[in-house]
Amino acid sequence: MVVTSHKELLNTDSTTGLWIGEFTDPYYEFRDKNYTVVIASPQGGQPPIDPMSKLTEHVTGSNRRFMDDDFAKHALKHTLKLDEVSAADFDAVFYPGGHGPMFDLASSTTSAKLIVEFLSQHKPVAAVCHGPAALLKAAEMEPSILKGKKVTGFSNAEEKLVFRSDTMPYTLEDKLKEMGAEYHMALLPFSSHVETDGLLITGQNPLSAGPTAEALIAMLETK
């Protein structure tokens, strides 16, 4: 799992980072199926957590499980540096969201190369909410990653509803379309929605995090 190291937003003192439920929901989907999970981030160490994701209305069962899981908390606090990992050592990669990836993972050459490596080795790449921002840099290197591919991610409508539009340098939906992707979303904002196209699996929003992980597991098990 690759998480963000970025917490600053534009035009505000509020901070962002990793949306914790988008990490914990998939994390336990993988753990409960006996997959080994290794966590990496651009800077390594403790990633910033979006304070909004810790509010009561956003807390999921996996959040509560995480708070009592010393092993998982230690793993998230001590992420590997992204340049220390190689696709050859793993079966798949998963990018959780939060607004942080829109800044660092969207422009990370190291992350982009990792995604290209996974796909070139015929291994799946999954991302949820703002996690698909990591695909943007990868698609600069290899346009076929997004061009004509069915994808989803946090929508323009959802961005407006969370009042973060003015704090972001761009919107993910628009960028994915600019890169030639065939963007799809749920009929209603904040409904679960997952797209699978070849080795690429994307989820639209926080509610899609668990289902995106389930789709990735299903793909791995068929292999």
Image (tube, grey):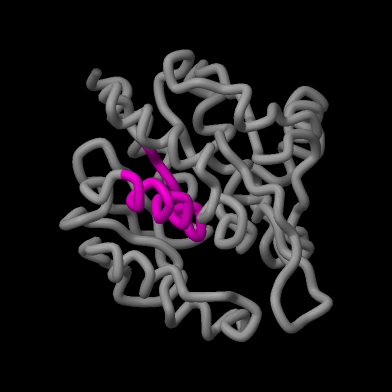
The percent position of residue 55, horizontal first and vertical second, equals 77, 65
Q: Residue at x 51, y 28 (%)?
A: 30
Numbered label tally: 0
Instruction: Give x and y (percent) for residue 68.
Output: 81, 34
Q: Is 127 included in the stretch rendered in magenta?
A: yes
Question: What residue appears at the point 43 percent right and 51 percent down from the top-left corner?
Answer: 137
Q: Is residue 130 magenta?
A: yes
The answer to whether 38 is drawn above or below residue 193 in the figure is above
Residue drawn where x is 57% and y is 83% of the image: 165
Q: Quadrant of residue 223?
A: top left
Q: Quadrant of residue 42?
A: top right
Identified at 73% across, 34% down, the residue is: 44
Between 170 and 198, the residue placed more toward the observer is 170
Q: Quadrant of residue 103?
A: bottom right
Q: Which residues are magenta?
A: 125-141
Which secondary structure dominates the residues rendered in magenta?
helix
Task: Decide which of 32, 182 is in the foreground and name it.
Answer: 182
User: Quadrant location of the N terminus?
Assistant: top right
Residue farthest to the left, as pictured: 148
**In the rendered view, does 38 fall on the left or right side of 127?**
right
Position of 143 compared to 134: left or right? Answer: left
Relative height, residue 169 to residue 193 (above, below)? below
**Left or right: 94 as drawn, with respect to 104:** left
Where 105 falls versus 215 (above or below)? below
Q: Position of residue 106 (x, y in %)?
A: 51, 55
On screen, residue 116 above or below 21: above
